[in-house]
Image: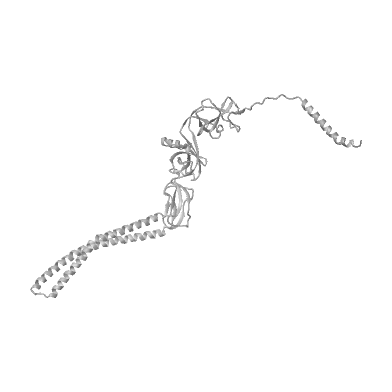
Amino acid sequence: MPSVKPVLKWLLPLLILAITVVLVGLLMESRPRPEPQPVEERAWPVAVQTVELSAHRPILRLQGFLESPSLVTLTAAVEADVLDVTRLEGERIDAGDRLISLDQRDLELVLAEREAELADLQEQRRIEERRIQSDRRELALEEQILALTRQELRRLRNMAQEQFVSPSDLERAELESTRQELAINARQFAVDTGQARLDQLDARKARAETLRDRAALNLARSQVKAPFDGRLAEVMVAAGDRVRPGEPLLSLYDSQLLEVRVTIPRLYLSRVQGAREADGMRARVIVDGQSFDARLSRLAGRAERGQGGVDALFRLEGDAGNLALGRFASLELALPEEPDALLLPYEALYDTARIYRVEDERMRALDVERLGDARFADGGRGVLVRAEALANGDRIVITQLAQAMDGLRVQVLEN
């Protein structure tokens, strides 16, 4: 009997646990079971827009920067010290305004030297003219003397035949005649080359006049003046600086010739070119909160490799003198009208080229051609699309859904 107690000690808990499990199972089987309810598909609430196809003008939004074809850099024409800078960067200037003054003392000395050289050459030419006139008169006299000498030589030769003169007298006469011929030849050469000497002096005089004019021009260039109305972009020197020829002094631009450089995407390039050839293209430009009208001036003649379009330059109209070069500009360009187009809110577009049409309370995907942006009647902007499958009266989902897919059930909200 003592051996039965240990067996009951570990068997009894197991028996109790088994009875408990059986009772729980019976209770689970006897509980009431609810009837299964059918799962109803969810309908997503969306707003729609009824399709009304019509002609719209796409608006191409572009960004660029201000520049000017008239931007010039004035450089020093002479070596001199800067005496005064009268205008500062950013100031508006008028044509002829003095901008920088250079030291003129060295330039005045050079001009005086050139004028003295020219005066000396002018006097040399007057002297040469008088010398030529004198040579001509003396040549005539020398020829008269030669005639007399030859006459005397003939007389002596006749007398020598009769032995009335000595041979030495005849030789002296012949020598005198030869000397006179040599003198005439020298005088004749001086007369013949007189015009050549005048021409040489004229050439030296012309060169001296050129040097004089250059010195006068350099003296005038010591006063740097504005070549046109505009605005100073940058001043590179200050009073006391020593400048040399070719060194930049300042840069300025014509404020009436400001342009915006933007890149026309390849997708719109043909339309822009066609409209430009037809009647030109106008745009609206926003710079620093200011609005300006602009007109397409020209397309760039060169495109960089890998560039997704061609640069276009739009000339600003009106007074834009307060704008600074390099400023960021936003441009809206109205493209030619597109027929049979649909203007939708941006929320209606998925993946840049897909919209959803409501058919039998379900969304049906429709691929479209994106034509650009356009404005609603109230001035707001939207996306302009076109698709052959679109027809007037179709309903397009204009609510952006994260769960959007073909066949998704929707509930159209009443406007």
Query: Residue 200 appears at what percent x and percent y?
Result: 28, 60
The C terminus lies in which quarter of the figure?
top right
In the image, residue 86 above or below residue 323: below
Residue 7 in sight: yes
In the image, residue 409 above or below residue 94: above
Query: Residue 102 appears at what percent x and percent y?
Result: 43, 56
- The answer to which image quadrant residue 138 occupies is bottom left
In the image, residue 395 above or below residue 234: above
Q: How many marks?
A: 0
Asked whether, in this view, residue 410 is left or right of residue 254, the answer is: right
Q: Nearer the viewer, residue 296 or 18?
A: 18
Q: Nearer the viewer, residue 112 or 380?
A: 380
Asked whether, in this view, residue 38 is left or right of residue 133, the answer is: right
In the image, residue 189 above or below residue 302: below
Residue 377 in sight: no
Model colouring: one colour
Query: Residue 115 appears at what percent x and percent y?
Result: 34, 59
Query: Residue 134 appears at what percent x and percent y?
Result: 22, 63
Outermost residue, right side: 1
Q: Nearer the viewer, residue 314 or 241?
A: 314
- The answer to which image quadrant residue 186 occupies is bottom left
Asked whether, in this view, residue 377 is left or right of residue 221, the answer is: right
- The answer to which image quadrant residue 298 occupies is top left
Outermost residue, left side: 162
Asked whether, in this view, residue 152 is left or right of residue 385, the answer is: left
Residue at 20 percent across and 67 percent down: it is 183
Q: Nearer the viewer, residue 299 or 11?
A: 11
